[in-house]
Image (cartoon, rainbow, N blue to C red):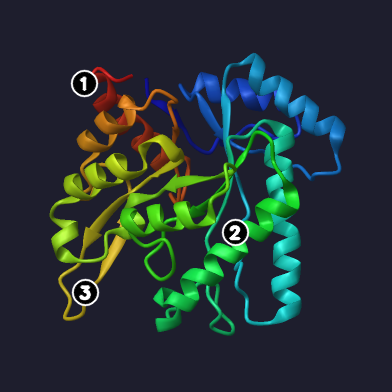
Amino acid sequence: MIRFGGPIFGVKQDDPAAFARAHKEQGYRAAYCPGVKIGDKERIKAIRDAFEKEQVVIAEVGAWCNMLAADPATRKKNHQMICERLALADEIGALCCVDYLGSEVPGTNYGPHPDNFSAKGFDLCVQTVRSIIDAVKPTRAKFCLEMMQWCLPDSPEVCLDVLKAVDRKAFAVHMDPVNIVTSPRVYFNTANLLRRCFALLGEWITSCHAKDIIAREKGALHMDECRPGTGVFDYRTFLTELAKLPHHPPLMLEHLPNAQEYAKARDHITALAKELNVW
């Protein structure tokens, strides 16, 4: 019931069949999109066919650039790249293309600024997402915004507001709930955060990220990402709620430094999912 995935090490991506098979051998049923450009139709087909054969879904194509870059030339370049990545997701059979919204703060990717959360910022978010979806017109893949601390959407409630305002069938939810653990109250009750996310957004959740979080004893609030199982994040609730969704959004490991850490995270989540009878 849990469609789980993560990065693969030690297998070259230039052989799509071997790369797809390696995911299955790791116990994964979901994958990040291998490296490929939208114009390489032959390789796109080879990747799509290889992953379909192994019954491993391509969870997401990452864009990962500032959609609101202050410099007009950079913003135009980024929008073109995002459109290409969304078109690639649609062509290769990925569930979604995901990016963070970003910020108009010069020289940053998602720099903090009060405008990020203003009415003006909300309208700019909606207009920007619409412009990308309307330019590409994907028929299968969804476009999603990463949940973030410093820019929209920064809570499940705001995510729902953005979803409704954008009003496009091709717009969906990418859930990275660790990113919106932004206060001690949320930190000590991530189960409540997760239940809100699934209650409000469940039908639109297309892909999820798996990581953990731990607070440090410092004068100013400080929290770090860490490997699943080494922080406070309530994975029992996460896996239980995720398994209830009939469309089985993938859960993808990320942001770990090496293959050994990914293996530990994989084993922890796999064991917990089996214990909960959602594997």
Name which residue type carries label 1. Answer: Glu
For mark 3, what is the residue? 221
What residue is shown at x 81% (from left), y 32% (from top)? 43
Q: Which mark sits nearer the N-terminus, 2 or 3?
A: 2
- Amino acid carrying label 3: it is Leu
Which marked residue is nearer to the observer: mark 2 or mark 3? 2
Residue 75: image x %, image y %? 69, 73
Q: Quick check: 273 above or below 148?
A: above
Tell me where residue 16 appears, x and y as whole percent. 72, 27
Residue drawn at (20%, 67%), measured in percent from left and top? 216
Q: Give, as a three-letter code, the residue at label 2.
A: Val
Write down the residue under mark 2: 129
Name the residue rendered at 30%, 46% in the picture. 197
- Is the residue 162 above or below the residue 55 in the image? below
Left or right, 121 with reference to 134 = left
Picture quarter with the C terminus: top left
Using the rendered image of the protein, determine whether residue 114 is visible from the camera's viewpoint: yes
Specify the quadrant of the image occupied by residue 104: bottom right
Q: Secondary structure at mark 1?
A: helix
> Considering depth in this image, is 159 or 5 the residue closer to the camera?
159
Distance of label 3 from label 1 (alpha carbons): 34 Å
Point out the tag, 2 or 1, that comes first from the N-terminus.
2
Q: Which mark is residue 275?
A: 1
Q: Quadrant of residue 34?
A: top right
Question: Vertically, is 166 above or below 268?
Answer: below
> Residue 172: image x %, image y %?
50, 44
Mark 2: secondary structure: helix
Which type of secondary structure does the marked residue at label 3 adopt?
loop
On screen, residue 62 versus residue 257, left or right, reads: right
